Image (tube, helix red, strand yellow):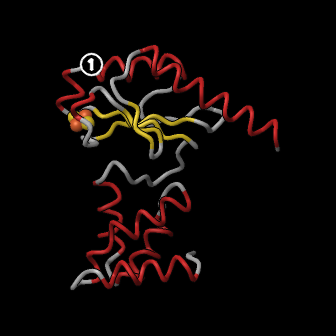
Amino acid sequence: MFTEQELAHVEELKSRYPEKQAAIMGVLHIMQDKYGYIDEERATYVAELLELPPEHVLGVISFYEMYHDHPTGKYKLQVCTNVSCMLRNSDMVIATIKERLGIAMGEQTEDGLFSLHEAECLGSCGTAPMMSVNKDYHENLTPESINAAIDSIYAMEKSNNGNS
Ligand code: FES
């Protein structure tokens, strides 16, 4: 499930902690970056690598919103709904995305491009409301900037497909 190189990365993560189990977050990141989500089989593999019960790994995946146990869109729109963002209208962000893409929270678009998720504070409270799109942050969001971000992804996908 992991390449030699990924396994070496896992070993390096494990070596950073007195207890190898503490590397769980980093190992889950490697798994999710590779496959996009972590189902039971992948969670069991991580559990074996770290000598943890699979239930423990599954519990971590379900506790943290950044991990997904089912397929997500190619672009994960994670909207922060914590206090600063909530006070600065994260409801508008969610409503704008729902209306634009025709999906509800936790769903993905039919073309598999976008999925919508709620996130806890992403550490960008001073520029609320915000969302992350995969690893990119979009801040001080307005309906216009949200639609512009989605437009630019569609344009990029279109040009990538045109070049393939
Ligand atoms: S509350 Fe939204 S980034 Fe911190």
Image position of 161 (left or right of 44): right
Q: Residue 141, located in which quarter of the rendered image?
A: top left
Secondary structure under tag 1 reads loop
Q: Quadrant of residue 139?
A: top left
Q: Is residue 5 above or below residue 61?
A: below
Residue 70 picture location, percent across and down: 49, 51
Q: Residue at x 82, y 44 (%)?
A: 164
Q: Which residue is mark 1?
A: 89
- For residue 143, side relative to residue 88 (left or right): right
Along the line of sight, the residue nearer the viewer: 63 or 76? 76
Q: Position of residue 99 (x, y in %)?
A: 49, 16
Determine the image quadrant of residue 61: bottom left
12 or 76, nearer to the observer:
12
Q: Is residue 5 left or right of residue 63?
A: right
Point 52% across, 45% down: residue:
72
Residue type (three-letter) at the residue carrying disc 1: Asn
Give the x, y percent position of residue 120: 26, 41
